[in-house]
Amino acid sequence: MTDLSPIYRIAGLGILVAVLNIFLVQADRKEQAQMLSLAGVIIVLLWLVQMVGQLFADVEAVFRW
Amino acid sequence: MMLWLPFVVGMGVVLTVFQAHFREEQPTWGVLVAIAFATTILLALIPHFQATFQALTILAREASVSSLYLSPVLKTIGVAYLTSFGAQISREAGEETISALMELAGKLVILVIALPLLQAVLYALFGILGY
């Protein structure tokens, strides 16, 4: 069956970052809020780069004949 | 065996709703979710591709088609899938330039793959014409 755990993981991190972001904005710390969003995006991007790398390797293995 | 199809479609519909929200609020997360979905689905589809191509290869071998002719076709399909994966995601995020460059790179690679075939066709033509 399709392994959808990366999507759930990304959604979870997104919700966490959004909630913390709201807290920080309410506490008048816009700078930290922006840094937090950027950190979340970079973490997810690193996960995705690994996944895309695996995808490229798999495609290369399948379509090489 | 084909149970993943409704799963993929359902997940896609749900994520479409989320994307409609993300596009207004946080475009970065929208792009990340799109990449995650595309990569997950393609990774899940890879084994099925492999099975199909193995059947195709066996068929070609029984019909005694030379690998010189089948191999470029398979490679071209792979390059086209990868290129459209990247180009679609960039285009959806509004980066026309980046997606156009990705497609240019893919076209170049496909041209290089097709070069031996073109050469073979031209040599056959020259042979017929008697050069």
Image (tube, coloured by chain):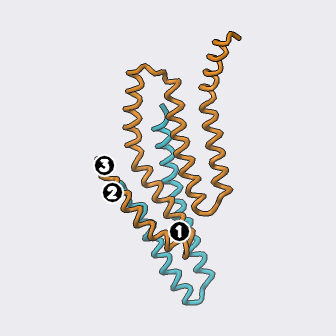
Chain colours: A cyan, B orange
Task: Decide if residue B13 is on the left or right side of residue A29.
Answer: left
Which residue sits at x=59%, y=89%? A28
Q: Nearer the viewer, residue B70 or B31?
A: B70
Residue type (three-letter) at the residue carrying disc 2: Pro
Provide the secondary structure element on which disc 2 rests. helix
The residue identified by callout 3 is B2
Q: Please provide percent x and percent y for residue B122.
A: 65, 21
User: Which chain does the residue under circle 2 lie in?
Assistant: B
Q: Farthest residue toward the top?
A: B130
Separation of disc 3 and disc 2 at Cα? 8 Å
Q: Earlier in the sequence, mark 1 or mark 2?
A: 2
Q: Residue furthest right?
A: B131
User: What label does residue B6 carry, if any?
Assistant: 2
Q: Secondary structure at mark 1?
A: helix
Q: CA distance from mark 1 to mark 2?
A: 25 Å
- Front label number (1 vs 2): 2
Q: Which residue is mark 1?
A: B29
Q: Quadrant of residue A35?
A: bottom right
Q: Position of residue A30 (x, y in %)?
A: 61, 84
What element does badge 3 sit on? loop
Q: CA distance from mark 1 to mark 3?
A: 30 Å
Tell me the chain of label 3.
Answer: B
